[in-house]
Amino acid sequence: MNKLILVTNDDSIHAKGIKELISVAKTFGDVIVVAPEKPQSGMGHAITISNPLRIQKYEGFDDVVAYACSGTPVDCVKIAIFEILKRKPDLLLSGINHGENSSTNVLYSGTMSAAIEGAMESIPSIGFSLADFDSDADFEATKSISSQIIKDVILNGLPKKTCLNVNVPKLSLKEIKGIKVCTQAHAYWDDKFDSRLDQFGRPYYWLTGNFSDVDKRDDTDLHALKNGFASVVPTHFDLTNYKVLENLKYLEK
Amino acid sequence: MNKLILVTNDDSIHAKGIKELISVAKTFGDVIVVAPEKPQSGMGHAITISNPLRIQKYEGFDDVVAYACSGTPVDCVKIAIFEILKRKPDLLLSGINHGENSSTNVLYSGTMSAAIEGAMESIPSIGFSLADFDSDADFEATKSISSQIIKDVILNGLPKKTCLNVNVPKLSLKEIKGIKVCTQAHAYWDDKFDSRLDQFGRPYYWLTGNFSDVDKRDDTDLHALKNGFASVVPTHFDLTNYKVLENLKYLEK
């Protein structure tokens, strides 16, 4: 029987990246799309609990069944599994994101949170991102690399409770040196707020800032991307820092 | 010099839980509050990037300087550090959440995401939650336990890039058996959608479901809570599953 593949993203069902990912997914099985009706970048693992969700059939992908959902990327995964499909898909693909989701960006990323939600549901799940924010970005290299990785994952499965965070540098396929399996870099945003006044003289603030890579290790995703490789980080949802458990036992009373 | 303590939450600046946490925080230093103007439960690590943020002075805490922010809990932390304070506080306290944030709920929790954001900024950070959703819950036991933990953390600091996820069962202080340092349980939501029709006959969906503890380990936060202990999970933001890195090297091309 054909594999059932759920495709979602955070840039919305109208983004070029999801269309490109669908074209890859179709070569591996039957595709169903449940994606946000509006952009949901930066929504992290948010779920909608104080408002109801809406879904609407979307006809923009020819022969592929698709729904636009009013919620977040994680909502899309939940409503796809528990309401639309009434079963778990065999594979979950999220993206292709317009913009990098390397390093700690995985925490803010709706694209990756959808993949993590898939892993929580024991579905082999992969998030794909291209280091190019352009709405008309060239996804050809990312499609080729995605194809290779999906093929391997279908053949071999993924470790339990683990999804993949795949990032591709903004280079041609010829220029990309290969695929590296990496750790998540410890980088951070040096945030700034751009303060402005509205038409009534009241202040408002835009979140802005520079991304700062302070990680000196050479096995990180940022290191791989800077050196022309696509990065693959095995990503799980156990946030326990096991290394410090013993040191903190003194807190027990 | 007095410690500068930032207090935030996800239940909004109007919740009883943050008022109770402020009363504890005041015994340890100078408190500033930056908290969401509206409830932000389930917002996870979401940030506001497509809309500007607003902040407004809030006068509800007597002598404590407080701001209500239009954004998410993580937005509150960012705007507190980079716009309001223009410095990092010495300690970040988030909560006290009305409802448990144990196990994988840490990923959906705005309260814990604020603490994780603090850890990303190298600020000793603690999230507190009480296993009681009641808006008028009794926080006395949680306040006492929070006090003990804050005292220890101020004295000894926290391991780098690590915050604490503290959950307290709905019991009196006398009934609580103690504090346990735990791992994050591998539990999950068995989601359901409650489908209804609006006044025009169009369907809408409420996310609902039951929490399912499938973790057999006896060192988890859920295990501790079920057995009458408060749980403390050292929580970090490195989602790399290091254990499977080698096994996945075959993906490298």
Image: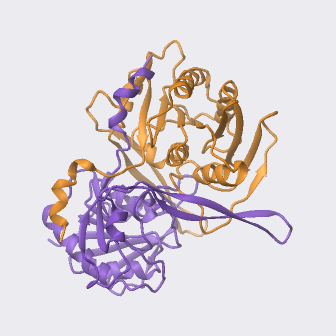
Chain colours: A purple, B orange
Given residues A95 and B175, the one toward you in this image is A95
Given residues A229 and B42, the one toward you in this image is A229
In the rendered image, the vertical position of residue A21 relative to residue B182, given as above or below: below
Residue A121: give x, y in percent of width and height: 31, 53
In the rendered image, the vertical position of residue A120 relative to residue B253, given as above or below: above
B13 sits left or right of A95 in the view: right
Given residues A37 and B37, the one toward you in this image is B37
| Quadrant where the N terminus of chain B is found in the figure | top right
Residue A238: give x, y in percent of width and height: 34, 44
Within the image, what quadrant is residue A100 found in? bottom left
Q: Going 39% across and 77% down the picture, which residue do you hit?
A: A18
A245 sits left or right of A211 in the view: left
Asked whether the viewer can see residue A94, the reply is no
Direction front: furthest residue: A216
| Quadrant where the C terminus of chain B is found in the figure | bottom left
In the rendered image, the vertical position of residue B215 relative to residue A221, given as above or below: above
Q: Going 46% across and 86% down the picture, which residue do you hit?
A: A136
Direction right: furthest residue: A200
Given residues B96 and A231, the one toward you in this image is A231
In the rendered image, the vertical position of residue B118 relative to residue A123, given as above or below: above
Asked whether the viewer can see residue A226, the reply is yes
Residue A248: give x, y in percent of width and height: 41, 27
